[in-house]
């Protein structure tokens, strides 16, 4: 399989699989939270999501036992649901 990325680069199957794996690794909750320098940055990001987005995120974070972040997400979700 050969694909072209947004920059016009041709990606073969191996390169594509490598990029997919990097993305998957990046979005694992324990890795993802490391992208935020402060709790406030995390809160700002979380506020961008809908109630449904937050529910999905809470479920995923619970699987990784990131309960401190789940608490923040639940508060934001509850505030949006009001």
Image (cartoon, rainbow, N blue to C red):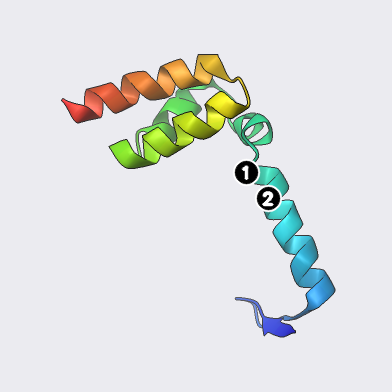
Q: Residue furthest left?
A: 82
Left or right placement of residue 35 versus residue 39 in this view: right
> Which quarter of the rendered picture does the C terminus lie within?
top left
- Give percent across and percent down for residue 16: 75, 70
Q: Is residue 26 or residue 43 the one in the foreground?
A: 26
What element does badge 2 sit on?
helix
User: For residue 11, which quarter of the picture?
Assistant: bottom right
Residue at the image point whose x is 54% and y is 34% from the top: 60
**Location of mark 2 (residue):** 24
- Give percent across and percent down for residue 68: 52, 14
Circles 2 and 1, Cβ within 8 Å, touching? The answer is yes
**Location of mark 1 (residue):** 27
* Mark-to-mark CA distance, 2 and 1: 5 Å
Residue at the image point whose x is 58% and y is 20% from the top: 66
Please say whether residue 50 is visible from this viewpoint. Answer: no
- For disc 1, the neighbor class at 10 Å (few under 14, some 14 to 19, many from 20) is few
What element does badge 1 sit on?
helix
């Amino acid at each position: 399989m050969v694909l072209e990325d947004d920059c016009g680069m041709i990606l073969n199957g191996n390169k594509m699989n490598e990029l997919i794996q990097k993305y998957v690794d990046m979005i694992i909750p324990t890795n993802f939270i490391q992208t935020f320098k402060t709790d406030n940055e995390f809160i700002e990001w979380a506020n961008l999501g809908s109630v449904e987005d937050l529910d999905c995120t809470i479920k995923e974070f619970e699987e990784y036992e990131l309960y401190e972040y789940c608490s923040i997400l639940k508060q934001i979700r509850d505030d949006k649901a009001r």
